[in-house]
Image (cartoon, helix red, strand yellow):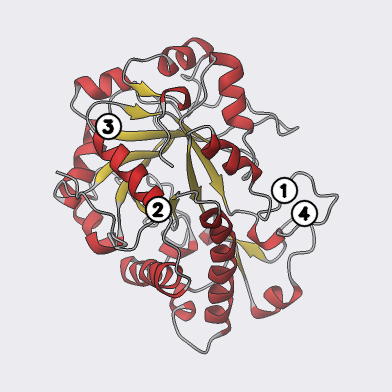
Amino acid sequence: EPEVDLVNPKASNEARNVYNFLLEQSGKKTLSGVQSSHCHKNDFIDAVYKHTGKHPALAGYDFLFLQFSPTPDNWSWVQNYNDISAPKEQWAANGLVNYMWHWNVPNSKADWENGVNNYNFDGYAFYCDKTSFDIREALKEGTWQHDFIMKDIEEVAGYLQLLEDENIPVIWRPLHEAAGNYNLYGPNGAWFWWGRHGAEPCKQLWKLLYDQLVNVCGLDNLIWVWTVDVTAGAEDQYRDWYPGDEYVDIVGVDIYAQDTEAKTRQYQALVDMTKGKKLVTVSECGNIPDPSKCMAAGNKWSWFMVWPNADSNGNILLTPSDNNFKLNTSAYWKQVMSDPYVINREDMPSLK
């Protein structure tokens, strides 16, 4: 059975309420969720509501544009993280709030000193094949890389503090897909820079992040989600990358498959890795695993989080032609959002 307490013994009442609610629903219902396409807006949530008459229970946001925030006034395409109106709206309506972090890093000290001053993220990236930033150097005190990550962590903490000040708990999923992404490894052997040099540095960075945000910055509104890579045949490696039960509240897996089946292999891998001690979730997906099929298979997915697709003007595409998403048809969206095993925002109690 999943553990009954959050890993942070000082967790806020609201964070405990959210976690307790997720525990109560485990094996009974799964929460609907979508990731914002503009990182800090409710565009996808609103699009689903417009189409189905129901809001997803969980809204995902991303600190992707951390280097741009606060933003110049004319950059309306990036929302300033000081403006927390989107998560405030979601929480006020009894919805839950999720944050992740596509963590952009500079290629060099000079790139960091020059700063991000255009639309192109020149000198900054998060993909391994786009940056030479070395996590091992970043873990050594006295290096410019360490100075950079500590400054970024401090900045993220400030934005998370704004949410805590409003008593908004955050389902927090940093360092996602650390071990790679479904065999789509680049030339450096990992998907993102935090996974490039293997499990040990990545686990150290997770623990550093936990220590800084919880123990140094005193953030008690976070529910910590670790994303597992469950590439078939790599089962022996899952536990190698896991930061440990004392640093993780929930484990998730990101699934982009060209079907809507129950994903029993991935579910069982998560349960086995944690010996059943943690709730498990589809922390990202393209095509939505059918909630009724998941329940019939005994897969207790806590929620699913659909990744956004948008057209060239930034407008959400509910039914993209991309193979990873094409089964999310207009009819299927309505089916999923009205599934008896799905909890939408309209079904949520107040957890304040």
Query: Tag 4: residue type?
Result: Tyr
Quadrant in the rendering for residue 49: top right
Label 3: state its secondary structure. Answer: helix
First-in-chain label (2 vs 3)? 3
Q: Which residue is mark 2?
A: 180
Compute the Cα span from label 1 to label 3.
35 Å
First-in-chain label (2 vs 1)? 1
Q: Is residue 42 left or right of residue 274?
A: right
Query: Looking at the image, can residue 143 be seen?
Result: yes
Q: Is residue 23 above or below residue 229?
A: above
Residue at image position (28%, 55%) is 6
Residue in front for this viewpoint, 251 or 182: 251
Residue 197 place in picture, x, y as percent: 39, 69
CB atoms of marks 4 and 3 within 8 Å:
no
**Which one is closest to the eye, mark 2 or mark 4?**
4
**Which one is closest to the eye, mark 2 or mark 1?**
1
First-in-chain label (2 vs 4)? 4
CB atoms of marks 1 and 3 within 8 Å:
no
Compute the Cα span from label 2 to label 4.
27 Å
Residue in front for this viewpoint, 17 or 106: 17
**Which one is closest to the eye, mark 4 or mark 3?**
3
Q: Which residue is mark 1?
A: 78
Q: Which residue is mark 4?
A: 119
